[in-house]
Image (cartoon, rainbow, N blue to C red):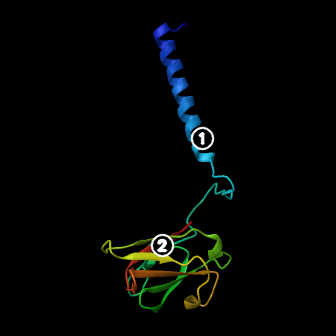
């Protein structure tokens, strides 16, 4: 069955645009800055995730892979991972404040911290305003 010139032109145009879009996407997905480490995560899932209230209590229904949360001081939270083989120095956690104004901040220690017993399976999360540690609810995800 033969196609009209108009149909063939439309097919070739969509093929060309598809290849261009696919090539652009593939080039972006694989591109990495020179000297950067190669990251492979073919089936990445969260190693742990938790919602933590300002008083240090976690929400059991909204937690996975976090064994315990302790609160050694105002605005300081130690999030212990269930999987003891995970090393916090090799993970990339993300924390987000919950129900609070923009003047507050949240930080995660990327190395074992004395406040949390210098354990490699426990993150220190710090919340508060600039220069002042204050309790605040947050969520944390560790891929």
Up the image or down, 112 lies above or below 13; here it is below
Up the image or down, 89 lies above or below 9; here it is below
Local crowd at mark 2 within 10 Å, few (<14), some, or many (≥20)?
many
* Local secondary structure at mark 1: helix
Q: Earlier in the sequence, mark 1 or mark 2?
A: 1
In this view, the residue in front, 96 or 58, is: 96
User: Which quadrant of the figure contains the C terminus?
Assistant: bottom right
x and y percent of residue 20 in the render?
55, 31
Left or right, residue 126 beside residue 104: right
Give me the residue at 59% from left, 86% from top.
113
Which circle marks residue 140 in the picture? 2
Which circle marks residue 133 in the picture? none
Q: Quadrant of residue 127?
A: bottom left
In this view, the residue in front, 115 or 121, is: 115
Give me the residue at 63% from left, 46% from top.
30
* Local secondary structure at mark 2: strand
User: Which quadrant of the figure contains the N terminus?
Assistant: top right
x and y percent of residue 118 in the render?
62, 88
The Cα atoms of the two marked residues, 1 and 2, are separated by: 30 Å
Which circle marks residue 26 in the picture? 1
Left or right, residue 100 beside residue 71: left
């Amino acid at each position: 069955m033969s196609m009209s010139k108009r149909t063939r032109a439309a097919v070739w145009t969509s093929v060309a645009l598809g290849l261009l879009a696919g090539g652009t996407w593939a080039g972006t997905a694989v591109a990495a800055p020179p000297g950067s480490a190669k990251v492979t995560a073919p089936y990445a899932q969260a190693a742990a995730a938790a919602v933590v209230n300002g008083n240090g209590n976690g929400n059991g229904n909204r937690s996975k892979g976090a064994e315990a949360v302790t609160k050694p001081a105002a605005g300081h939270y130690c999030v212990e991972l269930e999987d003891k083989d995970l090393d916090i120095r090799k993970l990339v956690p993300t924390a987000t404040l919950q129900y609070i104004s923009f003047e507050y901040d949240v930080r995660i220690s990327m190395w074992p911290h004395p406040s949390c017993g210098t354990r490699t399976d426990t993150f220190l999360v710090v919340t508060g305003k600039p220069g002042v540690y204050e309790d605040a609810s947050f969520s944390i995800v560790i891929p």
